[in-house]
Amino acid sequence: RWFQAPHLRRIFDLLNADGGEVRVVGGAIRNSLMGLPAGDVDLATTWRPEEVTERAGGAGIKAVPTGIDHGTVTLVIEGVPYEITTLRRDVATDGRRAEVAFGTDWKADAERRDFTINALYAGVDGEIIDHVGGLGDIETRTVRFIGSAAERVAEDYLRILRFFRFFAHYGSGRPDAEGLRACAQARAKLATLSAERVWTETKKLLSADDPGRALLWMRQAGVLSEILPETEKWGIDAIPALIAAEKSFSWRADPLLRLAAIVPPDAARLEAMTKRLRLSKAESAYLDRFAEAPEIAATLADAALERQLYRHGTEGIVVRLRLALASARRKAETDPAFLADSASFHRLLARAEKWQRPVFPLNGADVLKLGIPAGPKVGEVLAELEAFWVERNFSVERATLVARLESMVRSG
Ligand code: ATP
Ligand code: MG
């Protein structure tokens, strides 16, 4: 039972004393009730942040002020972080950030959370405390706003994306009708949110076991075109094929591969998207490599594949091949003509994944030795020889390349 974990025991001993109280809340409770692995453990307390810090100090527990404005102190026990947030109630909001006040009222704290399944608490004895009907919604796997959906959305428009994100991960059947309507109606307000918040939520949505259903509902509600207009002309229909291939081949669920599957592989448009959503450098580079990699035909010969891998790098081509394989497998379900394509993409992918980049056997020193002065000319000469070597499938020996270099130099 999660609540007997020794770390939590220490936190309960520390804060369930002298008239104060602490409870576990949010994702950890939701997931454990659904029989799913819990991520971070968040806790809520009646103690003020500075009191949490002081008590932790007295007990030799490290306390980090990770969100003092929001009332959050992170206790770190044997390297594991526990976010402890002082009970809050909403006082005002502009739809982007809520203004909150500290309090000691558990029900008010529950009511300012987004969904009923996220507002369950557990005390030291493991008893679940439900102020908002979350237990019933856990049972039916319903993502339901607490109170009026339209009002809750107007308080924080990020909740539109959270609605679909939690539906993608935990929902079953159709999304709650009132919530869906409220999200559809407020969709234009998504443009007022910061790019970072939008991308963080979108990435979590794309990380669900199967984000396909949620994406369809987002499209239907007009929400998808607000955050990913690129997908409108291209389409999210590639998702089911990709999810099926991920399962068959045990590919890690990768939100960026899923994003690559639903946006057009066009460098300029991808760049506009990565800028707009403020993707990290590594994330943008991944999509760039995908856009720059050539489309691979199922009939491509192995040697030609290896030349492409050398020129464009493995990563972008693996993305291309995974998407091509997923799509061919899907088509082969209804048209056996695609079975051959599917088999070839599978073979090409296996080759690409285990491919080792050969090392070009010449370098600048070989060129300088022949009396070419240091400068751009050296690089040009090397690039020409490298292209010759790649064209011949990396099989030209160093001695042959040196002889060729010498004759190039002689003929100027
Ligand atoms: P995860 O497993 O993704 O961490 P989580 O439920 O813990 O899921 P968080 O985003 O970490 O989600 O938020 C923790 C809790 O804080 C939520 O369960 C919810 O009760 C509350 N919460 C977070 N963001 C909002 C929001 N925008 N509006 C209202 N409540 C929120
Ligand atoms: Mg969490």
Image (cartoon, rainbow, N blue to C red):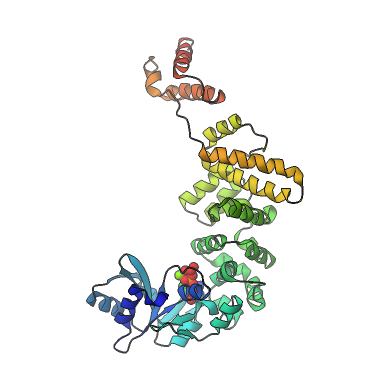
Q: Residue at x 56, y 24 (%)?
A: 391
350 or 44: nearer the viewer: 350
| Location of residue 178 (image quadrant) | bottom right
Side of 368 where 215 appears, left or right: right
The quarter holding residue 295 reads: top right
Q: Position of residue 8 (x, y in %)?
A: 35, 75
Question: In the figure, 138 relative to 343: above or below?
Answer: below
x and y percent of residue 402 in the render? 44, 16
Q: Quadrant of ligand 2?
A: bottom left
From where the camera sits, is residue 183 visible? yes
Q: The N terminus appears in which quarter of the rendering?
A: bottom left
| Looking at the image, residue 9 lies above or below residue 39 | below
Q: Return the residue found at the far front.
A: 1
In the shown orientation, is residue 46 left or right of residue 347? Answer: left
Residue 217: horizontal and vertical position, in percent?
66, 66
Q: Is residue 68 above or below residue 208?
A: below
Q: Is residue 69 left or right of residue 143?
A: left
Give the residue drawn at x 49%, y 10%.
411
| Residue at the bottom extreme, as displayed | 19
Q: Nearer the viewer, residue 277 or 204?
A: 204
Whether residue 374 is visible, yes or no, is no
Q: Number of callouts in the render?
A: 0
Q: Residue at x 66, y 57 (%)?
A: 240
> Where does the image place residue 394, in percent across and percent down from the top left?
51, 25
